[in-house]
Image (cartoon, rainbow, N blue to C red):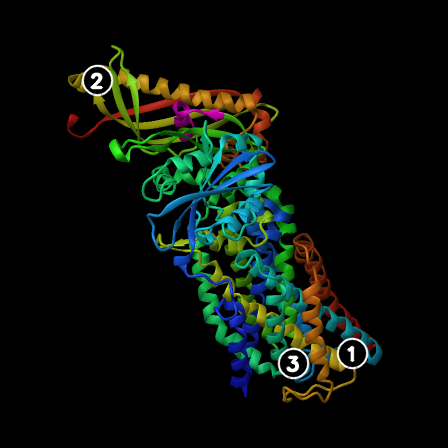
């Protein structure tokens, strides 16, 4: 049993970690460079203390959950039926919006880097249907995909990172002085935002997460690797293009990949890398839809079960279809212009994501306190 | 799970470009592979030229052009008019810009490079003086034409080529407000007889301010740019010794050190530039004079004086324009992070009022068997 739990935790960690690769390559270092200029690459390091604090708070809160309970069940229990349902509808709506945005921005990555003459719908619809398929099935299928994709994605990322760092111009990264502290702080928001979503997903969104003592201590070391990885990624891209150019490019990481030449002969591998990044998009959209369907079904008074048949419409499962199709529809109409997509990508979604990351534990804490009183 | 995998396999062809779904698929033999992009000013827009060769036959180089309101518009027109096959720009290697367009401004072009899915930011940009890019692209023949010549130039430039890549120009324009771009001139080729024709040869640098060509640094002073930016590559320099005889020195290595002079109020008052150069005497009319230490000292003094003048000319231009196209501010900021904070951006405005002093220390070694 203990071995199974550990295996589940490992799978969940893979799912949440890999799903974050999608926003990471969208926001780092472009958004950070916009905020922090030359200090952008080092800004994720400053996010570490806050992240550790946030993870500690979530792990403490997690201990209040009962066995097998996820955030939606917990919300209904502590906030009461009416407030809990409102909270779940809001959370479900946010997750669907995030799913739709991920579909749209994933399509844009293809349009910007490989298929400029294509239409966003060609990518939004297939990916949306795949995410819907993942949401219709059991959570364990999505977890297994994450475990299988992990070695491939991480090794590709590592190779690209090393090649990028090798070609980096260090004068684009230094000097940093105490006067840059304010910029560093501003530049750490994107990293905080990304990690907060990942932590919330790990601890709360899906059923069956670890709730025993010591989880935080075990994960703290791993969590410290996250800002370190983002720092190296930022250094590789910013070292190649400089902060102003990074802020100007819509996909600086993929621009870096386009410029890499391996063994003086192998170049233009960005199409392969962009193709591979379907996997993080799939995991993120699948994760969002899985969590959203649970929220919406609980809010509507249904009781989701761990084992359900994929094409069964009973027990509110029609809401999964509705949610999936709504996300696809929204993904098709959302931010049609590059300028508006940039606004969504660098302003609106991070702001909403960070607000959600703060509001979720905040509301639950309030609910817990009220219950105890 | 099996059904999920099956569905995944069925859906993935939608994204992969498989021929039965992706109808724009082309075999490489059907394509014209563009290697050099030329851009000139044209009434109401730009004249875009692409030097390309057939994917099936490398020797079949040709140049096609179209005028458009913008670079992307001209590219679209060129694609529509291409009779020899679809143009593929994914392997474009160089951009050649006519002087006229550079004077009008290159920001549109650089923005196109930034946002195009075909072009790489590392592509070197060359500026052609006294001729249009199209003229050069059609005049240079043999092999893959202009692409071969520009590739050879890029290789010869080594690290210095990165100074003038599209990405570096954009970055420097953003950070310093100015950048340099390598200039070329059309010249008769070295081959004689049937193979004689035209080629392009390096000249100096063009100075871009706010994206527009504002000044030229000609071939003689180009060495000053190389010394100030630490991008010197081995190159010969012809001097006159004290007796008026020619002596050729090969410049091999150099290093440039900047010493800021701070005022009591903490403001930057001046700049001391110390350059060390190592070279070797290659060709000297009076062979026996090489072993004479007085002769070597005198020749070294001539070398130092010649290099000081070139460096001085480049700095004078930078001061008169009031822009830091050499990236001196960034180097000062690297050296003094606290006091020099912001100089990478602001040095240009300070330059006209700064006291500048240049000192060059030369070291001449005897080449090969001349010891």
Q: Residue A338 carries which label?
A: none
Residue B181 location (% of width, % of height) = 47, 34
In the displayed structure, B91 sits above or below A226; it is: above
Question: Per the image, is B167 magenta?
Answer: no
* Viewer can see residue A50: no
For marks 1 and 3, the one nearer the N-term is 1
Secondary element under disc 3, as helix, strand or loop, is loop
Magenta region's main secondary structure? Answer: helix
Q: In which quarter of the image is residue B286?
A: top left
Q: Name the residue under label 2.
A: B293
Label 3 packing within 10 angstroms: few (<14), some (14-19), many (20+): some
Picture mark count: 3
**For residue A22, side relative to residue A79 (left or right):** left
**For residue B72, side relative to residue A320 (left or right):** left
Mark nearer the viewer, 1 or 3: 3
Q: Do labels 3 and 2 share a chain?
A: no
**For residue A215, side relative to residue B164 (left or right):** right
Residue A95 location (% of width, % of height) = 70, 70
Q: Which subunit holds the residue at mark 1?
A: A
Q: Which mark is residue A207?
A: 3
In the displayed structure, B69 sits above or below A290; it is: above
Q: Residue at x 55, y 36 (%)?
A: B106
Which residues fall within the magenta stretch?
B216-226
Image quadrant in which the C terminus of chain B is located: top left
Q: Which subunit holds the residue at mark 3?
A: A
Name the one closer to the observer, B43 or B359: B43
Secondary element under disc 2, as helix, strand or loop, is helix
Q: Residue at x 60, y 48 (%)?
A: A247
Image quadrant in which the N terminus of chain B is located: bottom right
Q: Name the residue under label 1.
A: A78
**For residue A238, side relative to residue B84 (left or right):** right
Residue A168 location (% of width, % of height) = 45, 48
């Amino acid at each position: 049993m203990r071995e199974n739990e550990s295996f589940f935790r490992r799978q969940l960690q893979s799912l949440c970690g890999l799903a974050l690769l999608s926003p990471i390559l969208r926001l780092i270092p472009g958004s950070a460079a916009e905020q922090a200029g030359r200090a952008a690459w080092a800004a994720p390091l400053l996010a570490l203390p806050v992240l550790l604090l946030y993870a500690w708070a979530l792990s403490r809160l997690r201990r209040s959950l009962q066995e097998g309970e996820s955030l939606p069940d917990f919300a209904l229990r502590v906030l009461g039926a009416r407030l809990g349902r409102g909270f779940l509808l809001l959370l479900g709506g946010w997750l669907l919006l995030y799913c739709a945005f991920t579909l749209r921005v994933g399509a844009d990555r293809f349009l910007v880097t490989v298929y400029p003459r294509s239409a966003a719908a060609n990518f939004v619809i297939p990916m949306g249907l795949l995410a819907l398929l993942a949401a219709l099935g059991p959570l364990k299928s999505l977890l297994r995909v994450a475990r299988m994709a992990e070695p491939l994605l991480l090794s590709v990322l590592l190779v690209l990172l090393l090649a990028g760092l090798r070609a980096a111009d260090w004068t684009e990264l230094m000097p940093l002085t105490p006067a840059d502290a304010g910029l560093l702080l501003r530049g750490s928001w994107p990293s905080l935002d990304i990690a907060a979503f990942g932590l919330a997903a790990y601890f709360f969104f899906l059923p069956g997460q670890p709730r025993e003592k010591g989880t935080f201590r075990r994960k703290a070391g791993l969590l410290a690797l996250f800002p370190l990885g983002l720092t190296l990624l930022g250094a590789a891209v910013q070292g190649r293009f400089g902060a102003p150019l990074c802020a100007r490019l819509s996909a600086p990481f993929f621009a870096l990949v386009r410029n890499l030449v391996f063994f003086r002969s192998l170049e233009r591998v960005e199409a392969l890398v962009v193709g591979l990044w379907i996997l993080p998009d799939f995991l993120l959209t699948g994760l969002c839809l899985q969590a959203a369907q649970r929220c919406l079904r609980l809010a509507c008074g249904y009781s989701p079960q761990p084992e359900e048949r994929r094409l069964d419409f009973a027990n509110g499962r029609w809401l999964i279809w509705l949610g999936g199709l709504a996300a696809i529809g929204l993904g098709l109409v959302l931010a049609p212009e590059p300028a508006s997509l940039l606004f969504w990508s660098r302003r609106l979604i991070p702001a909403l994501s960070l607000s959600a990351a703060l509001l979720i534990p905040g509301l639950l804490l309030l609910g817990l306190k009220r219950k105890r009183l | 799970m099996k059904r999920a995998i099956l569905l995944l396999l069925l859906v993935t062809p939608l994204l992969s470009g498989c021929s039965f779904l992706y109808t724009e698929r082309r075999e490489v033999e059907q394509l014209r592979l563009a290697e050099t992009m030329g851009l000139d000013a044209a009434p109401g827009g730009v004249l875009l030229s692409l030097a390309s060769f057939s994917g099936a036959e490398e020797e079949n180089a040709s140049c096609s052009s179209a005028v458009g309101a913008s670079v992307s518009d001209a590219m679209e027109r060129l694609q529509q008019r291409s009779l020899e096959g679809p143009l593929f720009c994914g392997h474009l290697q160089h951009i050649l810009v006519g002087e006229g367009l550079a004077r009008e401004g290159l920001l549109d072009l650089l923005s196109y490079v930034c946002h195009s899915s075909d072009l790489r930011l590392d592509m070197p940009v060359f500026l052609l003086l006294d001729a249009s890019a199209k003229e050069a692209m059609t005049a240079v023949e043999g092999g893959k034409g202009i692409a071969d010549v520009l590739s050879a130039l890029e290789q010869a430039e080594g690290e210095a080529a990165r100074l003038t890549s599209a990405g570096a120009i954009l970055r420097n324009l953003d950070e310093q407000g100015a950048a340099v771009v390598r200039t070329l001139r059309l010249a008769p080729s070295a081959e004689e007889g049937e193979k004689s024709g035209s080629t392009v040869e390096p000249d100096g640098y063009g100075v871009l301010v706010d994206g527009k060509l504002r000044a030229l640094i000609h071939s003689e002073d180009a060495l000053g740019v190389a010394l100030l930016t630490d991008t010197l590559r081995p190159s010969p320099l012809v001097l006159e010794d004290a007796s008026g005889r020619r002596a050729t020195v090969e410049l091999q290595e150099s290093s440039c050190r900047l010493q800021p002079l701070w005022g009591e109020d903490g403001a930057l008052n001046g700049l001391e530039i110390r350059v060390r150069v190592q070279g070797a005497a290659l060709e000297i009319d009076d062979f026996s004079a090489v072993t004479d230490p007085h002769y070597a000292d005198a020749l070294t003094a001539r070398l130092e004086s010649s290099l000081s003048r070139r460096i001085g000319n480049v700095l004078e231009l930078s001061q008169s324009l009031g822009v830091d196209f050499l990236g001196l501010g960034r180097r000062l900021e690297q050296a003094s992070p606290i006091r020099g904070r912001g100089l990478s951006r602001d040095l240009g405005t300070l330059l006209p009022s700064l006291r500048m002093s240049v000192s060059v220390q030369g070291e001449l070694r005897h080449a090969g068997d001349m010891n």
